[in-house]
Image (cartoon, grey):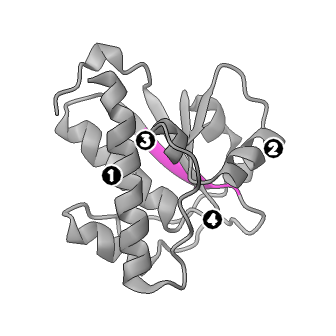
């Protein structure tokens, strides 16, 4: 696919899940790879919004393994980010992609959002529903979440071809 850079209106994307150790990190990794492959100058970050989100947690080994399977390494020194402690990440983003409706609601509950595009990944793809937490579901659960994330991003980006 070839993307018309001038049709994609966003420059800073934030992927949001519960604790920023799996789904949002896989989303961030795929988005960074996608924009790099398409020579698009878009920055991507991620964070967690749930009450149990903490700064400094290690990224899920299963998330790293399933992303490595498709040639996208997640950094070994990446640590989780609690968005409630880093509101600047919300404020700087012009597109926020949440993994679930609950994450989206929590963002609205915690932050003043003006002129922000905020979607669940499924909404971005023109669908409804959530991308379930793969924790405790083994590598197959992580592969399923990874593939859903990639599918939603690819479908959503078709609007900008």
The residue singled out by tag 1 in the image is 30
Tell me which residue sits at (34%, 33%) in the image.
157
Tell me which residue sits at (40%, 58%) in the image.
148
Residue 160 at x, y percent in the picture? 32, 23
On-image quarter of the N terminus: top left
Q: Nearer the viewer, mark 3 or mark 1?
A: 1
3 or 2: tag closer to the N-terminus = 3
Residue 132 lies in magenta, yes or no? Answer: no
2 or 1: tag closer to the N-terminus = 1
The residue singled out by tag 2 in the image is 110
Residue 77 makes an appearance in the image = no
The stretch of residues the image draws in magenta is 44-49
The residue singled out by tag 4 in the image is 19
Residue 56 at x, y percent in the picture? 59, 68
Label 2–label 4 contact, CB within 8 A = no
Residue furthest top in the image: 6
SS at mark 1 in the image: helix
Residue 120 makes an appearance in the image = yes
Tell me which residue sits at (43%, 86%) in the image.
138
The residue singled out by tag 3 in the image is 44
Label 1, label 4: how far apart the Cα atoms are: 18 Å
Crowdedness near tag 4: few (<14), some (14–19) or many (≥20) residues, C-alpha within 10 Å:
many
């Amino acid at each position: 696919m070839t993307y018309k850079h001038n049709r994609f209106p966003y420059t800073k994307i934030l992927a949001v899940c519960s604790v920023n150790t799996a789904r949002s990190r896989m989303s961030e990794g795929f988005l960074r790879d996608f924009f790099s492959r398409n020579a698009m100058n878009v920055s991507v970050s991620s964070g967690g919004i749930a009450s149990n989100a903490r700064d400094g947690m290690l990224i899920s080994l299963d998330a790293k393994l399933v992303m490595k399977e498709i040639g996208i390494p997640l950094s070994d020194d990446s640590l989780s980010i609690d968005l409630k402690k880093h509101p600047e990440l919300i404020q700087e983003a012009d597109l926020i992609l949440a993994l679930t409706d609950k994450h989206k609601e929590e963002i609205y509950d915690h932050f003043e959002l003006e002129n922000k595009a905020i979607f669940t990944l499924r909404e971005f793809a023109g669908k409804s529903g959530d991308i379930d937490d793969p924790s405790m579901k083994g590598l197959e659960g992580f592969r399923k979440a990874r593939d859903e994330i990639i599918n939603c991003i690819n479908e959503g980006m078709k609007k900008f071809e």
